[in-house]
Amino acid sequence: AKIINIIKEWNHNIKLVAFKASDETNEEKLIEIVKTKLTDSKADAIVANGMNAFDNDTNEVLIVLSNGDIKKLTMASKQEIAKQLIDL
């Protein structure tokens, strides 16, 4: 089992945000992949980004929240993305 899938068992009150790097370019398919990860991990949010994010100082991400909301953060510095994630 993946550690992320049992963190909520250890502490139900923890705010759990997981990350998913994917080479999926179809946004609808990516959302389905992320929703599955969200269900499996019981995370509060999953942040999905492309594989090219590792080579850049900027990024755009798709966030799927446990309440079903989906947010898309447009291209910004990774620091700005991090600030926005803290405000979730």
Image (cartoon, helix red, strand yellow):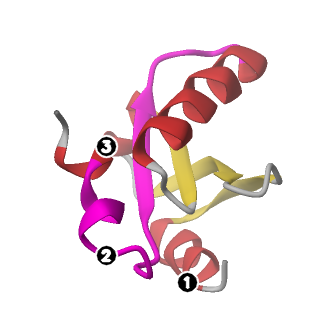
Q: Secondary structure at mark 2?
A: loop
Specify the segment rendered in magenta.
Answer: 6-26
In this view, 72 is above or below 48: below
Q: Is residue 28 left or right of residue 54?
A: right
* Foreground: disc 3 or disc 1: 1
Residue 71's x, y, as percent?
Answer: 79, 55
Q: Is residue 85 visible?
A: yes
Q: Is residue 74 magenta?
A: no
Q: Is residue 84 left or right of residue 10?
A: right
Which residue is at 83% across, 54% downward?
69
Q: Quadrant of residue 7?
A: bottom left
Alpha-carbon distance for marks 1 and 2? Answer: 20 Å
Q: Secondary structure at mark 3?
A: helix
Amino acid at dot 2? Asn
Q: Which residue is mark 1?
A: 86
Q: Residues within 10 Å of mark 2 (few under 14, many from 20)?
A: few
**Split into 4 quadrants, where in the image is the C terminus?**
bottom right
Numbered mark located on residue 54 in the image: 3
Residue 37's x, y, as percent?
Answer: 48, 34
Whether residues under marks 1 and 2 lie with C-beta atoms below 8 angstroms apart, the answer is no
Alpha-carbon distance for marks 3 and 1? Answer: 20 Å
Residue 63's x, y, as percent?
Answer: 66, 52
In this view, 43 is above or below 41: below
**Split into 4 quadrants, where in the image is the N terminus?**
top left
**Is tag 1's residue or tag 2's residue first in the polypeptide sequence?**
2
Q: Secondary structure at mark 1?
A: helix
Amino acid at dot 1? Ile
* Foreground: disc 2 or disc 3: 2
Amino acid at dot 3? Phe
Numbered mark located on residue 11 in the image: 2
Q: Residues within 10 Å of mark 1 (few under 14, many from 20)?
A: few
